[in-house]
Image: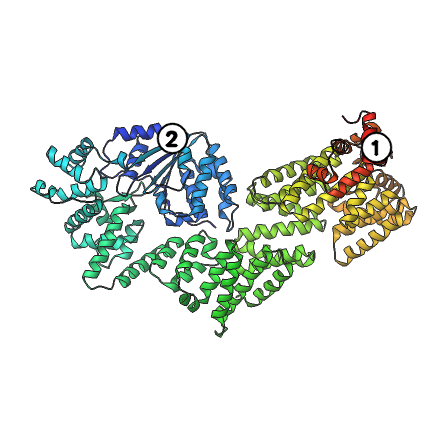
Amino acid sequence: MPPLILTTRLFIPTPLPLAVSRPRLITRLNDGLQTRLTLLSAPAGSGKTSLLAEWLGSQPPDPVAWLALDEGDSDLTRFLTYLAAAIQKAAGEDCLSVWTPLLNLPQPPPLETLMTGLINAIGALPNRLILVLDDYHRVDSPVFDKSLSFLLEHQPANLHLVISTREDPHLPLARLRARGLLTELRAADLRFSPPEAADFFSRKMRLNLAPDQISLLQSRTEGWAAGLQLAALSIQGLDDPGTFIRSFSGSHRYVLDYLLEEVLNRQTPEVLQFLYHTAILERFNAALCEAVLPENSNPARETLLYLEQANLFLVPLDEERGWFRYHHLFADLLRQSFTHHLTSTGTDVMATLAGLHIRASQWFEENGLELEAFSQATAAADIKRCIRLINGKGLPLHFRGGLLPVLNWLKTLRVETLNAHPALWVTYASVLSISGLTVETEEKLQSAELALSGAEMDEFNRNLIGHIAAIRALLAAVSYNADEVISQSQRALQYLAPGNLAVRTATVWKMGWAYHIRDEREAALAAYEEAFSISEKTGNTLIQVSAATGLGNVLELNLQFPRARQIYQMIIQKVGEQPMPIACEAHLGLARIAYANNDLQKALEYSQRSRKIAERIDFSDRLIAADVLQARIKLAEEEQNAAITILDQAAANARQQKFTTQSLEIITMQVLVHLRRGEVNLAGQLAFENDLPLCRARVHLAQGYINEALLVLTAYKNEALARAWKDRHFKSLLLLALAGRLSGDSQTAFSCLEETLRIAEPVGLIRAFVDEGPEMAALLSEASAAGILPDFCTLLLAAFPAAALAGERVTSPGAGQPDGLTSRELEVLQLIANGLSNHEISAQLYLALSTVKGYNQQIFDKLQVQRRTEAVARARELGLIK
């Protein structure tokens, strides 16, 4: 769930009265549109925001996305959520419809993936977009800077970025400057020249000052916008402005203090109280102001109207003038003045400010702005209120866009405070676990347990113990320790409060995942079903789609294709084609089912979509999984060389990224390709070296060793039956049927085949039969003639290629090479001729050393030689190599 949007941050402010016409700066900004970035970097009170607002008001109708940044934008998800809202406000709600769902997840994709999606969406806009980030200096986050650097490096041509800041951002400014892609306006550029100062005093502030007085003011303030405005406010109504003008001098700080005192001394006590009490607020409307003001105060709306008319640095934040903020510099000065006032009157400063922050927090909470409510509660140092706001109503605040604010607050707390509230240790651990800091997470969990030792085991503390176990289950899942995941999850469910559905549901899903990787499918199915059902009712989308993915996988393994297909389609409806492993797996699941149903075109389309999504995800094995499936499709289409090429590249990627599970899938496919090409020795080496039972059985059958195949298949079938592995049981029966036919045992062949047919027919499982080739076609013909499900046998036979029905072995195009050498064998032979060792060939072709040796033997056999030198000589004699 994304954070609630305070839309006032997206409004282009109305220029303050000091925004006189400054053609020289407007021209600079217009010219800057030809570059990538316009940077306004100058001290507070220089008029940056007002200048931008005036410039944008005079621009052609290009969409303008304006975002006023604050400290909370150090949380990348929160920043991107507000940024998306600003862009949608400028360019239409639909412009980011494909991208924004990523931000709704507690753990969005990596930064580069998020930014790439955003860049692509902006690049697709029909018009130029001007994106303004105001008050950049308020965000202190390397991740934030990295995201903007990535945007600048890959900036679409139709985007112009404008940054307003008090200090230079940590962005590649030097590189942009050197390439002529940066427009800069700095303090010296923004200073009011004497003619601009004269225009401001006479036309905007309606002051009749002599030229020498204007010159003195301009000199004393160094053309500083805030100083000029405060000076004008101080002069208004004076009979002798000359005396006042001569009375101050010095630095900006001195001028500000002097002028602020003059301005505040002119206000009524009611207005001064309003200014002091509302200065604690970043943004405010009349209702929020009244929440922090004493009872019987003047109506806030009237006071706001007066402040706006009096030009007291009030900035409107929406078109209706319902929300406002003070100029940041003015607000800082007000807060300092208020603290000085409280101290001088003997008032408890901390208690007074805390009371104001609590009242503001209550108002924000009542109005559904929980992040702002939490921020005010932290300012008040109200620990209990902070804990309650973090826990929220079901889903903790750090899962709803508040990760960084919560973490930053926890870092400020003393150990004594954390020990007094063990729930804070648990929250600390939860936040760190989401951030991937596993070592620090365990340290905080141990501190929580120590703080709880000796405490009364009431429902609240029991729930904390359950939460500790749930977090440890997550840590175990990161290291793929399924046994520990199950153990900790069971402990968590024993202690967690029944109403803590957010943690309970996530824990049940983790148990399902652990059972799944342990191949305990029935237990996994039950856990996934429970997690899916509860999350669907509670609206926990992340757990719902995660549980649905696991559910679809297990249903698919159980050959329950219709329901698995329905689950995968539901996932795609929810997440679309976002760069998420869940979206990859849903498309890949549909591709696998389409392949099983012999719809190769649809299987290819779904696998290509999955691959396209996977390319946008860092460190995901789904890219390799999609490649393996595409290699299977190529093999089904008799494009064996293409299949080998895909598998070789996939194997190289799997080794590089240490995806061991996918390595076995690749090897299985390589065995099938070698067998199809008649390369039984190579297939055997891979099958036996990697202990792949079904592959070993296929090699035995290809070699004519039926008894050995039967031993392997019988053991495999018995284990599959014992553990309710329906897909493996089906595959073993299919090969047992072929073994029966090859051994002349028609009774076993027909019995096993009939069982597979009865499993396959209801779910449209066709391709498994076709992939077994001519022997299976012959067996199906015989079974049909014997009256075994003849209609389904006829349907299956119609799916076989004509060559298989004729009893021919389908051969590789490579088998037509001279002397029967395949293209891969010729490639290896050429490298041998070039003097490469087996190790060097293995590295160059991304092949296992054993595979290279197998190719050597195949080459030697076909060329009828014994050694490498003889092979090279014979190949040159035949004109096979250079």
Give whichever of 710, 366 is nearer the camera: 710
Residue 235 to residue 520: above or below: above
Count of numbered tags: 2
Sequence-wise, the earlier of marks 2 and 1 is: 2
Q: Is residue 844 left or right of residue 374?
A: right
Give whichever of 612, 554 is nearer the camera: 612
As drawn, the label of residue 870 is: 1
Residue type beneath disc 1: Glu
Residue 594 to residue 26: above or below: below
Identity of the residue furthest to the right in this view:
744
Residue type beneath disc 2: Asp
| Residue 74 image offset from top left, x and y in percent | 41, 48
| Residue 116 image offset from top left, x and y in percent | 50, 38
Q: Is residue 306 left or right of residue 726?
A: left
Using the rendered image of the protein, determine whether residue 299 is visible from the camera's viewpoint.
Answer: no
Q: Which residue is mark 2?
A: 62
- Gap between marks 2 and 1, in whole Å? 74 Å
| Residue 347 image offset from top left, x and y in percent | 22, 63
Give whichever of 259, 714 is nearer the camera: 259
